[in-house]
Image (cartoon, rainbow, N blue to C red):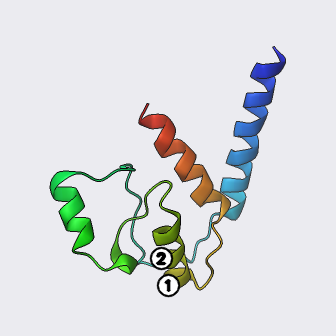
Amino acid sequence: MQRFMKSNGIWILLLTFGIWSESSTASANEPSWSPQVIARGEFREQIEATPIEQRPYRPFHFYGNTVRRQHYRGNPIPRPTDLGRTVIFTVRRR
């Protein structure tokens, strides 16, 4: 029972921080998130042919995501919503 309550508490905390930190001034040019952690085939070729600042954000791609955040937001530190998206995309893939 305590394990269930602890995991629910973590999800509520992530959701609260995600809603609290949502910015209404997001850049229109900022790339979206891609659920694929490992790119294969044509998607991989497309990503490699795209400059790093224009590639989509992907879970666990720390260097590329940091470069994009610095380029678009002027701050390389991820927001709680970025961390929440990483968790959501990795859980959905299982």
Q: Residue at position x 39%, y 79% from top?
A: 53
Give the image quarter of residue 55. Answer: bottom left
Percent position (x, y) of residue 70?
Answer: 55, 82
Mark 1 burial class by Cα count in 10 Å: few <14, some 14-19, many 20+: some
Residue bearing mark 2: 68
Q: Tag on residue 71?
A: 1
Which residue lies at the image location 26% right of the left edge and 67% below the top edge?
47
| Residue 27 appears left or right of 20 | left
Mark 2–mark 1 contact, CB under 8 Å?
Answer: yes
Please tell me whether mark 2 sits on a helix, a strand or a loop: helix
Dividing the image into 4 quarters, which one contains the C terminus?
A: top left
Residue ID at (41%, 59%): 33
The residues bearing labels 2 and 1 have C-alpha atoms spaced at a distance of 5 Å
Q: Nearer the viewer, residue 49 or 15?
A: 49
Q: Residue furthest right?
A: 2
**Residue drawn 49% across the image and 68% down it:** 65
